Image: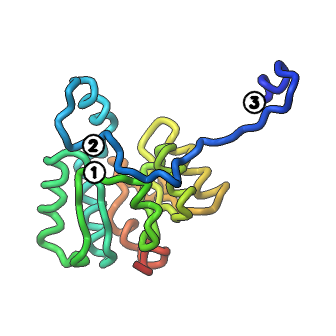
Amino acid sequence: MDALRQELPYPVFSVGPCIPYTSLQAAEHHAGREEEEPYMAWLDSFLSVSNAQLDEIAIGLAESKVRFLWVLRGDAACSGVRDILRGRDVASDSMVVPWSDQLKVMCHPSVSGFFTHCGMNSTLEAVHAGVPMLTLPIAFDQPIVSQLVVDEWKIGYGLKEKARDEDGVVRREEITAWIPISPYAST
C-alpha cells in the first residue's frame, strides 16, 4: 500500500478482502463431485492432516459432548472418522460431511465456534461472521494467521506447540479440555 501511495497522485485505501455477505448462494465448486479436469482433484488434495491427528480430533470432539459439523474431504477420511465416532457417546445431532457452503454455515446464528487450520479464507469468513476460533495450524502462513487470531486479535484459542506430542500431534485431551470452557459449549 505504501508503494502505491508514493506512486499515485490520489489517496489509496485498502479495502477487502470483500466477502459476499449478501450473496450466500451455494458454491459452484463442490469438492465431493466428479471434476472434468484432473487438476481440480489435485487442488482438492493439497496438505492433508495426518490420520493420527484426525483420530485425536475425532475422539476429542466426541469426548467434549458438544454437537459439531465437521467438514472433512474425501470419502476414506469421512468413513474413518465416522468409524471412530460410531463407538463413542457423540452428540446425537453431530455430523461429518465431505463439503459445505462454509460462509453460509459460518453466518448461521447457531454456530458458536470454529475449529480451524487457519487458512486465510476460512479465518476471514470466521472474522466476518463473528465466530471465535480454536486454531490448529499445519504449515505455510497458517501459524502466523493463528498467532494473529490468538495473540493480536484475541478472538480465538490456539492449540500451541507445547500441546503437541513428539510426533507433532495435538492430543485429544487438549482438544477436549478447551471446548467446554469455550463458546462452543453453548451450542
Question: Measured along the vertical axis of the image, is residue 99 above or below residue 56?
Answer: above
- Nearer to me, 174 or 132: 132
Rendering coords of residue 110 (x, y %)? 42, 73
Residue ID for mark 2: 30
First reached walking from the N terminus: tag 2 or tag 3: 3
> Sequence order check: which comes first, mark 1 or mark 3?
3
| Foreground pick, 22 / 4 | 22
Per the image, the residue denoted by label 1 is 99
* Residue at image location 47% in from the left, 62% down from the top: 107
Dots 1 and 2: beta carbons under 8 Å? yes
Q: Quadrant of residue 74?
A: top left
Amino acid type assigned to the residue bearing label 1 in the image: Trp
Measure the C-alpha gap from mark 1 to mark 2: 7 Å
State the mark number for residue 1: 3
Q: Residues within 10 Å of mark 1 (few under 14, many from 20)?
A: some
Judging from the image, what secondary structure is the residue with disc 3 in? loop
Amino acid of disc 2? His
Marks 1 and 3, how far apart at CA = 36 Å
In the rendering, at what x and y percent does residue 44 appear? 29, 36
